[in-house]
Amino acid sequence: MLLPTSILFELYVYRLDQNAYLQKFQEYANKYSETSYHPSIDDFGGVWQYNEIIGYLTFYISGRTQLRVEYHMIDAKKIVKTRRKTFILNDDSFCTRSIYKSMRNKNLIAIIQDCIDDCKSRLNPRYIDTSFIDNTLKHTNWKKVIF
């Protein structure tokens, strides 16, 4: 029997962070500085946000008693920049934490943050884009969202 689930949010996993990507593009462009060819970001592979995604983390509630994280990653032996990607489920319990209805909102925020930190450490040196959740985590009533 499947437990009822409720998806909370997703975070994208990148091969490398935006600054490193732009630095590699600059190195690529510098190779052609002496020639009449001036490469664009499209020649390099495209915009960082979409070109470098290698996976995503889905944060969800399982059975109203667990916060769980699924990790979907690209189906490839070697991770390189490409626009052709197929994502597969790597782990449906990449991170698991128990939650209780009696918890206060600040405790739920701490548990969510702990899961994010755990995912970051397990996926190091990959980059997890947490910009959305960083701006909304403390301003959301997670108790109402979850329960």
Image: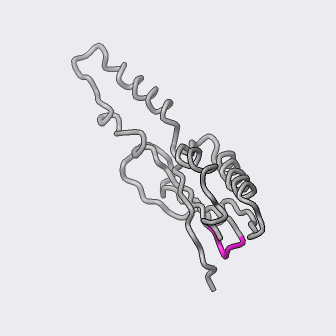
> Please, is residue 73 above or below residue 135 in the view?
below
Magenta stretch containing residue 99, yes or no?
A: no
Q: 133 above or below 22?
A: below
Read off the magenta span: 61-65
Q: Nearer the viewer, residue 129 or 126?
A: 129
- Please tell me in which quadrant of the rendered image residue 109 appears: bottom right
Residue 6 spot, x, y in % from top left = 57, 70
Viewer-closest of 58 and 38: 58
Residue 64 is one of the magenta-drawn residues: yes
Q: What number of labels is visible?
A: 0
Considering the image in quadrants, where does the N terminus appear?
bottom right
Relative to 114, is 4 on the left or the right? left
The residue lying toward the viewer, choosing from 112 and 46, is 112
Q: Position of residue 48 (x, y in %)?
A: 42, 39
Is 87 on the left-hand or right-hand side of 146?
A: left
Q: Residue at x 35, y 20 (%)?
A: 31
Task: State the image coordinates of residue 125 (x, y, percent, origin top left).
Answer: 62, 40
Q: Please provide percent x and percent y for residue 13.
A: 53, 48
Q: Residue at left 21%, top 18%?
A: 36
Q: Main secondary structure of the magenta part?
A: loop
